[in-house]
Amino acid sequence: MKVYKIERWDSISPPGSSNSLPMIYISADPSLIKYAQKNNYSFEVEIKGTNSIYDGKKIMGTFDSLLLGPNYESKEILNKNWHTIILTSYFYQYPPLMGEVIIPNLTEKKVSFNPIVKVKNYEENSPPVSMKKKSDLIGMNTFRIIFVLTLIFLILVLIFFLFKKHK
């Protein structure tokens, strides 16, 4: 088991997905890089010390070099020799504290891991509206507007036909 300080949090949206995934940045040492290579760049991690929903959860992560990840224009980030771990979890929010990531099986040559584990089922523990994505809220509001306009239209048509009958 080895603990690494989380330097930064971001969220990314994989192509074709409407869900964002959390991505953490760490300074990786040669033993972690070697471990990632032996495990096809995917392994289980545990987050701690963020004071958020991620703490204490075992989550599958995909390890990557920052140079192969998202396109960064900031040389400051590239010069830090950071690596990323994309967590297979919903991105709920930026944690209040950076925290640490634990790599539990780092001393083993290769691990066989369980299927991907999500932090929590989104439907069971839906975040408050203030934390939902704007696109979700826009879609919900658009549906409500269309529904109300349809009701108004039907009422107007009904009134029109009732007045036409009486004349």
Image (spheres, rainbow, N blue to C red):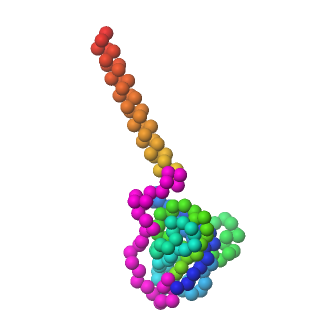
Does 125 sit above or below residue 129? below
Q: Position of residue 90 (x, y in %)?
A: 47, 63
Q: Depth check: 143 or 40 in front? A: 143
Is residue 113 inside the magenta stretch?
Answer: yes
Residue 62 in sight = no
Q: Is residue 106 left or right of residue 113?
A: right
Q: Which residues are magenta?
A: 104-131
Image point 35% across, 24% down: which residue?
157
- Residue 67 at x, y = what percent? 61, 73
Task: Provide residue 68's location: percent of width, then percent of height.
Answer: 57, 72
Q: Is residue 32 placed above or below 165 in the rendered structure?
A: below
Tell me the chief SS of the magenta region.
Answer: loop
User: Horizontal placement of 127 versus 67: left or right?
Assistant: left
**Quick one: which residue is furthest to the top in this view?**
167
Q: Nearer the viewer, residue 51 or 67?
A: 51
Whether the magenta-drawn stretch holds residue 2 is answered as: no
Question: Which residue sits furthest left?
Answer: 165
| Whether residue 78 is situated above or below residue 130 in the rendered picture | below
**Which residue is located at x 47 percent, y 50 percent?**
136
Q: Residue at x 47, y 59 (%)?
A: 19
Q: Nearer the viewer, residue 131 or 31?
A: 131
One can see residue 7 in this view: yes
Q: Position of residue 57 (x, y in %)?
A: 47, 72
At 40% from the left and 83% from the top, the residue drawn is: 112
Seen in the image, is 3 located left or right of residue 166?
Answer: right
Please state if 8 lies on the left or on the right of 89 as rendered: right
Residue 79 in which image quadrant: bottom right
